[in-house]
Image (cartoon, rainbow, N blue to C red):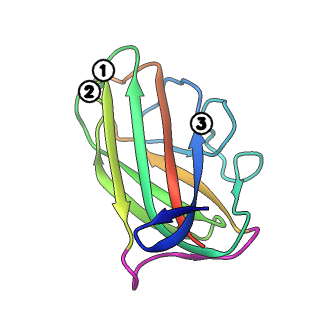
Amino acid sequence: MEQFGTYPAYSMEWHSAGHNPADSTTYFIGNIPAAPTVTAGAPYRVYFPRSGRIRKIAVIGAVFGTLGSGETGTVSLEINNTTSYQITNQFTWSAIIQSTGSVFEDDTAPVIEQNDYFQVRVDTPAWATNPTSVIYWGSLWIEA
């Protein structure tokens, strides 16, 4: 078990394979090395092995092809396909690497139960120039 500050914690990773995102589309990312899907749910769910509170999420996107034209999109953490926590509404695909994240304080830290699941949701903008060959990855830190 790791530590997050003074709390015992564990981390969970998630990632996608490369894809060419379309305009104004919602994608869901889990823990399968495949392109993001436009349908929430299995098999992209990542299940929590124990109960706790989510304390931190890190999100990284990389563009290995054409850079996007700079419009912004939204990245959220979805729990059980019912509750959404916005991480940023300023995510861009106009740099090779884009990173963002959130630290949840005591009153806002999502409570999760064993066998709950998460997916990362990406809502793309309508680009003038779409990015190509985009992958995503990141981590969650959960206070146990």
Q: Quadrant of the C terminus?
A: bottom right
Question: Which residues are the magenta region?
Answer: 105-115
Label 3 vs label 2, nearer the camera? 2
Q: Residue 51: image x %, image y %?
A: 67, 75
Upstream in sequence: badge 3 or badge 2? 3
Q: At x 45% / y 76%, what residue is drawn? A: 109
The numbered mark at residue 36 is: 3
Q: Residue 143: image x %, image y %?
A: 54, 71
* Alpha carbon distance from label 2 to label 1: 6 Å
Q: Quadrant of the N terminus?
A: bottom right
Q: At x 22% / y 32%, what residue is drawn? A: 70
Looking at the picture, tell me which residue is in the foreground, 67 or 139. 139
Judged from this view, the residue extending furthest toward the left is 70
Upstream in sequence: badge 2 or badge 1? 1
The numbered mark at residue 67 is: 1
- Give the secondary structure at mark 2: loop
Characterize the magenta stretch by its predominant secondary structure: loop
Question: In the rendered structure, are the residues bearing label 2 and label 1 in contact, judged by CB atoms less than 8 Å apart?
Answer: yes
Label 2 vs label 1, nearer the camera? 2
- Give the secondary structure at mark 3: loop
Q: Is residue 127 magenta?
A: no
Give amino acid for label 3: Pro
Q: Is residue 110 left or right of residue 24?
A: right
- Asked where in the image residue 55 lies, by quadrant, the reply is bottom left
Residue placed under numbered mark 2 in the picture:
95
Q: At x 69% / y 37%, what residue is drawn? A: 32
* Alpha carbon distance from label 3 to label 2: 20 Å
Give amino acid for label 1: Leu
Give amino acid for label 2: Ala
Q: Residue 26: image x %, image y %?
A: 51, 46
**Alpha-carbon neighbours of circle 2 within 10 Å: few (<14), some, or many (≥20)?**
some
